[in-house]
Image: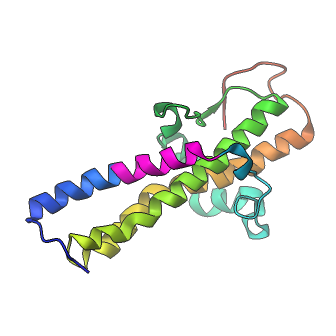
Amino acid sequence: MQIIHLPPPGAILLCFILWAFFQRLAAYICLRIPDRYFRHTSFLYKSRKWEADGEIYRRVFKVNLWKKRLPDGGKYMKRGYEKKKMKDFSQAGMEKFLTESCRGEATHLLAIMPFWVFGLFTPGYVVPIMLVYSLAVNLPCIIAQRYNRPRIIKLMNRGSDPHNGRKSGGNV
């Protein structure tokens, strides 16, 4: 329900400003939550049977073809963690990657939620548009995290370093 009436250029500008703010706020919040809340074995983050260890995302969404084009916001945030390329294939490094993958998923889930706020200062028909925008921006990142985690878990379960001790360079 629109309660603030702005001229259209002002409402459009506010939409851009608020989306940038909400994305950063979600990242800020999730970066302050302790690692123990981002366990890949917890209910929210564990792979479901229907996901077939991430294969559903490769088959249906072709994630392996486009995920490398996604931006990695972790490298732009203070205390952020870059997930685009794995730099450490040790057990500890892969555990850290899994934790940060869960944190990234939580960040994007949280960033979807404020779509309804735009109904406070735009006509009602804009709210579904904001929901579609929010899903289009955040779901690819969530899909990439859910695709990558089972692959990292398989590497960890093998107990071997795929790069023979090298500490950098692998795309996930």
Using the image, determine if residue 150 lies above or below residue 109.
Answer: above
Q: Nearer the viewer, residue 25 or 81?
A: 25
Residue ID at (28%, 73%)? 119
Q: From the viewer's side, name the closer residue of 64 and 32.
A: 32
Instruction: Say which quarter of the image contains residue 96.
Output: top right
Q: How many marks?
A: 0
Magenta stretch secondary structure, dominant: helix
| Residue 9 position by quadrant | bottom left
Residue 135 drawn in magenta:
no
Tell me the magenta residue range: 21-33
Of all residues, the one furthest to the top in this rendering is 166
Q: Is residue 62 visible?
A: no
User: Residue 38's x, y, as percent?
Assistant: 70, 50
Return the x and y of residue 169 as percentages of the image width and height: 66, 24
Location of the C terminus (image quadrant): top right
Q: Position of residue 109 (x, y in %)?
A: 54, 60
Q: Residue at coordinates 11% horizontally, 66% vertically from top-left?
A: 6
